[in-house]
Image (spheres, rainbow, N blue to C red):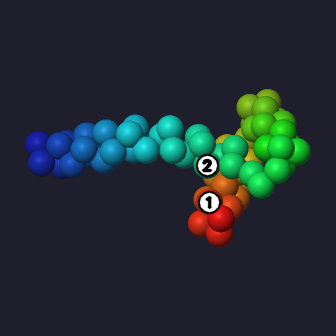
Amino acid sequence: MIKNAVMLWHGYVLWIRRLPQATGLMFTARTTLGRAVKVFLFGLGVALPLGSLIWALLFWHGNYIRRCG
């Protein structure tokens, strides 16, 4: 039981360390207009009940752009 708790804690610490990179990926775009649109969509995601789906798409798109560029 303690081993499982330690593994969960370790996974949480790794996730927290990678969080700033994830937020950077959410706003990654090729143009300034694209970045402005992504910021708008992020704000829209804050207001909508299922906004986390928008955030997941923003992260996925930023990850794709970072990989290709």
Q: Position of residue 17 (x, y in %)?
A: 38, 39
Which residue shows up at 17% across the image and 43% down it? 6
Residue type of the residue flagged with mark 2: Leu
Cβ atoms under marks 2 and 1 closer than 8 Å:
yes
Looking at the rendered structure, the kind of residue marked 1 is: Arg
Q: Position of residue 54 (x, y in %)?
A: 74, 48
Of 37 and 50, the residue lying toward us: 37
Residue 35's place in the image compared with 57, above or below, is above
N-terminal of the pair, mark 2 or mark 1, is 2
Instruction: Compare residues 63 and 45 and report the one nearer the observer.
Output: 63
Residue 17 visible in rendering: yes
Q: Residue at x 60, y 42 (%)?
A: 24
Q: Is residue 43 above or below residue 33?
A: above
Q: Considering depth in this image, is 4 or 37 the residue closer to the camera?
A: 37
Query: What is the secondary structure assignment of the residue under circle 2?
Result: helix
- Can residue 12 be seen here? The reply is no
Question: Residue drawn 77% across and 55% down?
Answer: 30
Q: Is residue 6 above or below residue 69?
A: above
The residue at which mark 2 appears reads as 25
